[in-house]
Amino acid sequence: MTAAAEKLSGGCLCGSIRFTATPKNDEMDVCHCGMCRKWSGGVFMAVSCGDVTIEDDSQLGSYVSSEWAMRQFCRNCGSSLFWRLREGEGHVAVAFQSFDDTGSFKFLEEIFIDEKPALYAFAGERPRLTGAEVMARFQAQQEGRS
């Protein structure tokens, strides 16, 4: 069974936040943008999810990082957990490393490749999109929902 076919459990480093999430597919993406790198302490490895249920959100912190998105984290241990659209029931990117079992995912693409520092690179071939390409795709998706 693939990750996209089932709810997966996960949580933060200290265990204050536990969640279940239903991945939209069995893919993990990496974002190299400056905000994600500062927020996660490296690259943000994320899984696009639909339904996300948090057991107890009393330690869940939220930071509005742009006009369209917020980042959520554990207030106790600082673990980066969720990147969410601010409006409506949109996209939720769950931190790949926060899942209890990451074995069923495959590495799909890298985004904001034009902001990636030169000192590291992931091996393997996959799509690598610039920030402008990502924003154009995002805009097209938003227009398709209107």
Image: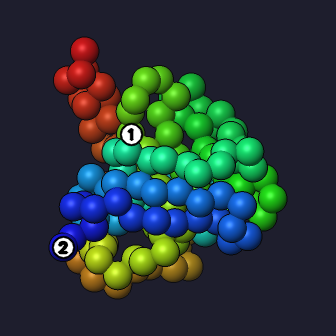
Q: Identify residue type, mark 2.
A: Met
Residue, x 44% and y 47% (percent of image)? Answer: 52
Q: Quickly name the residue at label 2.
A: 1
Q: Which circle, 1 or 2, is nearer the viewer?
A: 2
The C terminus lies in which quarter of the figure? top left
Q: Crowdedness of circle 2 by 10 Å Cα count: few (<14), some, many (20+)?
A: few
Q: Residue furthest top?
A: 146
Image-based side of 38 in relation to 136, left or right: right
Residue 12 percent across, percent down from the top left? 64, 65
Residue, x 68% and y 40% (percent of image)? Answer: 62
CA gap between label 1 and label 2 equals: 23 Å
Instruction: Judge by depth and name the residue closer to the eye, 84 or 140.
Output: 84
Which numbered tag is attached to residue 91?
1
Report which quarter residue 70 is drawn in. top right
Report which quarter residue 40 is drawn in. bottom right
Element under disc 1:
loop
Image-based side of 82 in relation to 60, left or right: left
Q: Identify residue type, mark 1.
A: His
Residue, x 56% and y 49% (percent of image)? Answer: 54
Q: Crowdedness of circle 1 by 10 Å Cα count: few (<14), some, many (20+)?
A: some
Image-based side of 138 in relation to 62, left or right: left
Residue 6 percent across, percent down from the top left? 28, 62
Element under disc 2:
loop
Report which quarter residue 46 is drawn in. bottom left
Instruction: Judge by depth and name the residue closer to the eye, 92 or 38.
Output: 92
Residue 80 percent across, percent down from the top left? 63, 58
